[in-house]
Image (cartoon, grey):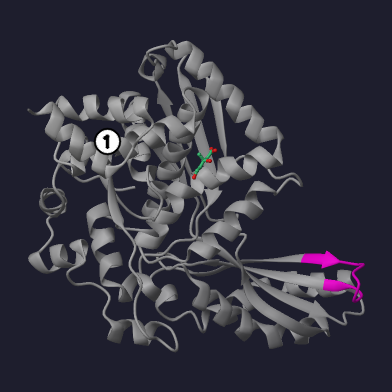
Amino acid sequence: MTSTQTPTSRISGFYKRSLDERATLVADWAGLSSDERAILVGDAGLSTAQADHMIENVVGTFSLPLGIATNFLINQRDYLIPMVIEEPSVVAAVSNAARLFRAGGGFVTSSDDPIMIGQIQVLDVADLNAASRAVLNDKARLLHIADEVGGSIVKRGGGARDIEVRPFPQTAIGPMLVVHLLYDCRDAMGANAINTAAEHLAPHIEALTGGRVNLRILSNLTDRRKARAEGVIPAAELATKTLSGEAVVQSIVEAGVFAEIDPYRATTHNKGIMNGVDPVIIATGNDWRAIEAGAHAYAARNGAYTSLTHWSQDADGNLRGNIELPLSVGIVGGATRVHPTAQVALKILGIESAQQLAEVIAAVGLAQNLAAMRALATEGIQRGHMSLHAKQLAVAAGAEGDLIPRIVQTMIEEGNIRLERAKELVSELTL
Ligand code: MEV
């Protein structure tokens, strides 16, 4: 990842600012033009006319909240993270978790080259071994043929990289040969390029194998295109009023093992990770169904569905976490290029390559997982949700400074967390 000088993303009390102040802060931080700021705040953005060119039978557009997660330090570079999501608490929780990772030096990330897999299904093959050999022996020519239709991806240094064969001698429809085309998509998600290349190769595969090609399509199990993130949280940062940092580290490690061994827990655990991943995928105009499909298939790659993260205690007693998942994201083409807000989101992120975006998203997923684990391992998820909700209501009712925690505490004690009650308390306590 390239490193450029950016101002700090460690912004305390971001949530306490007015909507307008937050937008101005982000616009200044990212150097947005006034047109881009208008898109960010929703005054401009995707028009119905633009939407009409994106899908069919358009009658309108659909809005979701766009929040900004703060505090991210990834490979020593500061990031503000645009997140599009309808669920409360996610953005606050991930910002808080990013602050904890920051105290341990921030995230360190890495990623594979952006290699996608195109699948060609070959049937009616008389001799699977001979057909496999014929394909592999002609690999160089096949790669060259695939690149004939590579267009801009090949011009940018991407294109066909390798061919693999996967024989299935016994299936319900007889022997099947699956040919994989490994294709470097560079900064594109690459679905169109890989599908075009697979379709273009198909007649040549038929000629070599003597078989009949049926499907020609990319695989969303993009396990050659993974991103990784890791980081450390000093134990002391995890201490609560009632629990020592060491106790919280232990509890989080125990919770991590729960997700590693039990698919019922792993599903919820990974859902929490996708709470961080999907909002950035959506904000940047990427295909979240593809990312979801790939992530969950990867989580089950060894036959049992398991956690996408791993948590351990390091030699100094601190908490160490890491994540690895397939992330086929692009920064050119598709909705990323067409959707004005996706363009602004990429500018806020300061993204220069698809790999950089994938690594940032991996870090957000890891942070989101920590946020959930920390809450679950300490006070439980509901209290945090409730106090955050109460805090938002107190601020909305006009409370400031010390008044906010007092109102929050009163509403929680009363079990009466409503805007009307917050307003009453603001007038009572400011008398
Ligand atoms: C809620 O959207 C996500 C969590 O359930 C994730 C988890 O349990 O790890 C809190």
Residue 399: say if magenta. no
- Expressed as whole percent of the image width and height from the top left, the position of residue 277 reads 45, 51
Q: Which residue is drawn at 39% across and 82% down?
A: 54
Secondary element at tag 1: helix
Determine which residue is flagged by label 1. 391
Q: Is residue 8 visible?
A: no
Quarter occupied by the C terminus = top left
Q: Which residue is drawn at 34% across and 60% down?
A: 283
Task: Determine which quarter of the picture holds residue 422.
Answer: top left
- Expressed as whole percent of the image width and height from the top left, the position of residue 134 reads 79, 75
Q: Which residue is drawn at 27% across and 53% down?
A: 349
Q: How crowded is mark 1: few (under 14 residues within 10 Å), some or many (20 or more)?
A: many
What span is colored magenta in the figure?
Answer: 166-176
Q: Can residue 319 be seen in this view?
A: yes
Identified by mark 1, the residue type is Lys
Relative to 109, residue 233 above or below: above
Relative to 17, residue 174 above or below: below
